[in-house]
């Protein structure tokens, strides 16, 4: 049985006697006399994740909650001969981050993804208190409601931020299970922080860093225990990673029908000069999907149709339309003057997503009898990246924060660039809105991905009526 506690590392240059780097990490202790064979039955290790190679002239020290009191911090030095650095090896992660304009450790001259720091501790370097049981698990369902324990800004503010706890969601898991993506904001020195299921001792991995697409948004990356233990298991004893047990409802969206993701598709668009972009779409009935007009035309104020459109239903099911055939497939209600909505005729036989109710009143205000402020909601769309080898949308969760009677729903479920045209759904899996845009800071231009604007269903019904002469499919 392993026990653990979050720790903070400082790295000192032995030559210049100054702090050169810091990171978060975890203290692990194995309490099993049959395995350890030490008589006391205890062995201990510390594990961290660094992005700069420390070399042989760096001294390592760590601290934790039981060593911090007020402004007083006691550091435990780790014997240098016990420290090993293992280069992180993951073809999946390496391929993924290479597609981003910026990521943690990009300026690392070695080209490495970083290093796992692992040190077996002599007894005089171990802890006595503040340890909790830890279970290493895999996870298959997303989103997952998780807890992050780390020490941001560890170079200067350890006493304030040690064991800093934040909660968020894991929104994506790659096909081989090497890493997870989260909508949590990454801060300096969080790398190495422990990621666990909320209100549980089940841990999924350590914070690796973040990836960022300039002016569009960023995602935090979590490295799975399976990758970490492949590198350092020879130093630890009796390590095993369990399959994830049945999750509590608070930790997952497992109550939602699985096919919801199948109703959300990725759209790749080429304009008249060959510039490619992508967005999302939602199948509302067999042979018809809905998206934003700006996904199709490139801009809400642009009325020119693209030269080419690909509809990615899955890795192996792709529809492609070009030229005049494509123009005949696109329907923009109200000549594109009123709403950021467009319909696309397609060939899929899949049933459409289940839509909630909602109607427009005689005075043109929207009736929100089907949703209210404070309701939980979930966003589903192909934001920030599109992996053609594994067509899985990003999923996030939040709440409805405001209902505008002109027809706009504002929520806190994340909407990244590329999610436009995706689905905003309630806890029953019913679509309540069409993702349209996120917020942006007017001064800095920073994307506010947790400020999400969606087109309401009453507006969608009005658009359907204008386009097809009826109030919409039975699901609308």
Image (cartoon, rainbow, N blue to C red):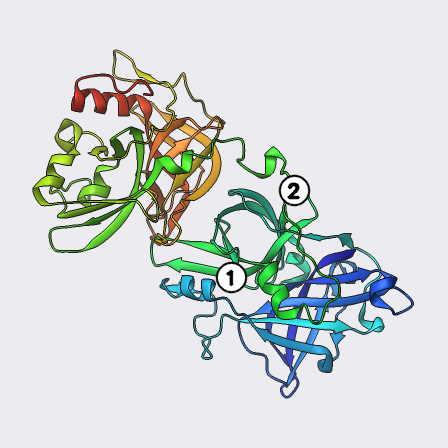
Viewer-closest of 216 and 466: 466
Residue 463, percent from left and from top = 22, 24
Q: Residue furthest right?
A: 39
Q: Evaluate whether residue 296 shows in this view.
A: yes
* Total marks placed: 2
In x, y percent, where is residue 383?
Answer: 37, 47
Residue 272 to residue 331: above or below: below
Which quarter of the image is occupied by the N terminus? bottom right
Outermost residue to the bottom: 15
**In the shown orientation, is residue 403 left or right of residue 171?**
left
Q: Residue at x 36, y 46 (%)?
A: 382
Q: Is residue 23 among the parts visible in the rendering?
A: no
In this rendering, the answer to whether 217 lies above or below 393 is: below
In the picture provided, is 410 more to the left or to the right than 61? left
Task: Give the crowd class for mark 1: few <14, some 14-19, many >=20 residues within 10 Å.
Answer: many
Q: Which residue is mark 1?
A: 209
Q: Residue at x 79, y 59 (%)?
A: 66
Q: Quadrant of the C terminus?
A: top left
**Residue at x-position 78% and y-position 62%:** 29
Instruction: Look at mark 2 in the image and give the residue it sits on.
Output: 245
């Amino acid at each position: 049985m392993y026990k653990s506690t979050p720790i903070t590392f400082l790295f000192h240059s032995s030559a210049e006697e100054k702090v050169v780097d810091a990171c978060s990490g975890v203290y692990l202790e194995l309490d099993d006399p049959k395995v350890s064979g030490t008589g006391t039955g205890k062995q201990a290790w510390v594990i961290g994740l660094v992005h700069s190679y420390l070399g042989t002239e760096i001294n390592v020290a760590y601290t934790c909650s039981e060593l911090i009191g007020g402004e007083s911090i006691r550091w435990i030095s780790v014997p240098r001969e016990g420290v090993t650095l293992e280069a992180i090896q993951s073809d999946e992660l390496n391929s993924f981050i290479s597609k981003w304009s910026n990521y943690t450790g990009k300026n690392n001259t070695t080209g490495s993804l970083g290093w796992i720091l692992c040190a077996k501790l002599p007894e005089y370097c171990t802890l006595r208190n503040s340890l909790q049981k830890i279970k290493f698990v895999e996870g298959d369902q997303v989103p997952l409601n998780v807890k992050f324990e780390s020490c941001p800004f560890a170079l200067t503010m350890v006493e304030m931020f040690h064991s800093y706890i934040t909660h968020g969601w894991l929104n994506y898991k790659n096909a081989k299970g090497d890493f997870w993506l989260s909508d949590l904001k990454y801060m300096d020195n969080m790398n190495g922080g422990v990621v666990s299921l909320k209100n549980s001792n089940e841990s999924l991995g350590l914070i690796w860093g973040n990836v960022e697409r300039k002016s569009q948004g960023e995602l935090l990356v979590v490295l799975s225990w399976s990758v970490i233990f492949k590198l350092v298991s020879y130093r630890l004893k009796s390590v095993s990673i369990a399959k994830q047990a049945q999750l509590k409802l608070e930790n997952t969206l497992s109550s939602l029908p699985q096919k919801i993701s199948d109703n959300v598709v990725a759209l790749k668009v080429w304009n008249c000069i060959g510039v490619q972009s992508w967005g999302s779409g939602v199948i509302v009935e067999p042979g018809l999907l809905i998206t934003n007009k700006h996904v199709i035309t490139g801009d809400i104020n642009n009325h020119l149709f693209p030269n080419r459109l690909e509809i990615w239903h899955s890795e192996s099911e792709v529809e492609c339309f070009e030229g005049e055939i494509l123009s005949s497939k696109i329907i923009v209600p109200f000549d594109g003057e009123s709403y950021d909505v467009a319909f696309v005729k397609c060939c899929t036989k899949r049933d459409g997503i289940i839509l909630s109710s909602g109607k427009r009143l005689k005075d043109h205000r929207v009736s929100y009898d089907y949703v209210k402020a404070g309701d939980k909601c979930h966003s589903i769309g192909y934001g920030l990246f599109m992996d053609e080898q594994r067509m899985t949308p990003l999923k996030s969760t939040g709440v409805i924060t405001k209902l505008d009677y002109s027809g706009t729903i504002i929520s806190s479920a994340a909407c990244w660039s590329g999610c436009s045209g995706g689905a905003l759904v309630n806890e029953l899996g019913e679509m309540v809105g069409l993702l349209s845009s996120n917020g942006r800071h007017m001064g800095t231009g920073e994307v506010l991905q947790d400020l999400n604007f969606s087109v309401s269903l009453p507006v969608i019904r009005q658009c359907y009526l204008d386009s097809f002469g009826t109030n919409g499919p039975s699901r609308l």
